Image (spheres, grey):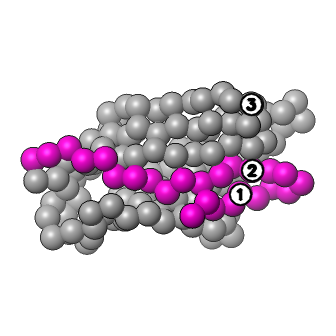
Amino acid sequence: MLEEQEFCVSQTDGIVVSACPVLVDEKPASHFLWGYYLCIENNTDDKIQLLGKDWSITDDKGNRYNDSSAGFKGELPELEPGEYFEFTSEAPLNSPNAVFYGCCKVLAHGQTKNIRIPTFSLSVPGGKTSHAIN
């Protein structure tokens, strides 16, 4: 299912984040279940640790859903140079259109950095597809 979707990519200080949304389920009563895949790649020369996330989804009705939490499903992964971490989750929405945006919190060189995730849309106007915003 993910291979049919378009990946969005962003890079901050040698750390690459790829994202891919997919509409998992659409119910007649205006309920939309979106799944998303993130891959965080350490393309730096040093080990990093993923500390958490601070991302939001804002739908076309103005509702904002935020996830500002430590870790990734209970994990605080450490990535050596060249390693990557994959993460999947779901977002139930009451609107067919929304935007996903934010950052991952990373520890590098003893300092916490915000690593931008690519902003992408969750949209179902007339079809069950999502579109990248670059």
Q: Which residue is drawn at 40% across and 52% down?
A: 116
Estimate how packed mark 2 is, as few (under 14), some (14 to 19) or many (20 or more) residues with alpha carbons within 10 Å.
many
Tag 1–tag 2 contact (CB < 8 Å): yes
Vertically, is 110 above or below 18? above
Quarter of the image where the C terminus is located: bottom right
Q: Where is residue 59 in the image (x, y as percent from the top left)?
A: 69, 36
Q: Which mark is residue 61?
A: 3
Q: Residue 78 carries which label?
A: none
Q: Residue drawn 63% across and 45% down?
A: 99
Q: Which residue does the numbered mark 1 point to in the structure image?
A: 130
Looking at the rendered structure, the kind of residue marked 3 is Lys
Question: Circle 2 is placed at which residue position?
Answer: 123
Q: Measured from the top left, where is residue 76 in percent x and y?
A: 26, 43
Q: What residue type is labelled 2?
A: Ser
Q: Which of 72 and 96 is in front in this view?
A: 96
Please tell me in which quadrant of the rendered image residue 70 appears: top left
Picture coordinates of residue 119, whole percent (x, y)? 54, 53
Highlighted magenta segment, given as a residue range: 110-134
Left or right of 104 in this view: 91: right
Residue 127 is a magenta residue: yes
Mark 1 or 3 closer to N-term?
A: 3
Q: Is the magenta stretch mostly helix, strand or loop?
A: loop
**Camera sees residue 101:** yes
Q: Is mark 1 on a helix, strand or loop?
A: loop
